[in-house]
Amino acid sequence: MYRLLIVDDEKDICENIKYLLDWSLYNITSILTATSYAEAVSKAVDFQPHIALLDINLGDHWGYELAEHLRSMGMQTIFCMISGYDDFNYVHKSMQATARDYLLKPIHVAELRAFIERTIVRDLHGVIPEHAASQPELDPVLQVEYSKFSKITNKIILIVKSNYRSSQSLTNIAEIFNMSSKYIGRIFLKDTGIKFSEYLTAYRMIQARRLIENTQEKISVIANMVGYSQLNNFYVHFKNYYNISPSTLRNFSASVPVAGAALTSPSPQEAPFEEGGSPSCDETLPSGSSHS
């Protein structure tokens, strides 16, 4: 039987999370909520939660500070940060505080369920009842289970998912791990079969397609939302990846099947990079540049 602690400075959010899943299916039978740092510490000491969902911003404290404090007290709780901020610095701080995941608000049920299932199986060595288990979570770019990747690659993917709207590079990510960018670039390439730069572009394209098909936002706004400051670069990358322009997809999304580009061995003509081929694994990918 597992215990869950939900911490958010907005009581309504705590209550909403309590009803996102049928927790009993995962043998989570005790759930407590807290709306402040002090209340969370007090309840955690007595409750000793197996899992804790922590809001990144708790008013006068940060969620990652709470995680660090509870960890310093010897708690083995598995932490997941929840946040309305898509900010690389928050992801970095959360990972330093040993958070296993970082979910953006509003929380999607599928993402929360996947985190809970991974935590129970991998960290708590439990079993997911057959009637509760969802299909294995697949990476949206590679269509491969995350369990197939190394811990470093999974952390890199988490950073991309949490911060794809901003400038990213393996150099910055490598600083989190205290490793060289070339080293983690080789690990990522070995695990996934593609370079970090290709993965980042592909993830941005997938998010752009979702927004084009499901919202009425202008294409220029969507381009900016997925990390492009130059609209022309976005159009080039999107057309290269899907073989259809963003505007055409919007006009015919209900009737035109769109297939993703092959990522494992793109030809130089297909790869959306400047002359000279794809950048090396440790090259910076500034937001909206030709290497976005």
Image: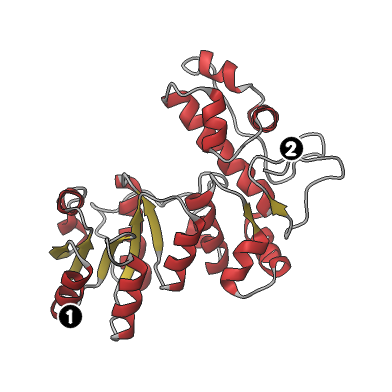
User: 196 above or below 66?
Assistant: above
The label on residue 45 is: 1
Residue 241 vs residue 206: left or right? right
Q: How is the image coloured?
A: secondary structure
**Near-viewer residue (120 or 182):** 182
Q: Position of residue 287 (x, y in %)?
A: 63, 44
The residue shown at (19%, 70%) is 40
The residue shown at (54%, 52%) is 160
Dot 1: element: helix
Q: Closer to the observer: label 1 or label 2?
A: 1
The residue shown at (54%, 38%) is 226
Marks 1 and 2, Cα distance to the nearest angstrom?
52 Å
Cβ atoms at labels 1 and 2 below 8 Å apart: no
* Amino acid at the residue labelled 2: Pro
The residue lying furthest to the right in this view is 276
Residue 228 vs residue 180: left or right? left
Q: Which residue is mark 2?
A: 272
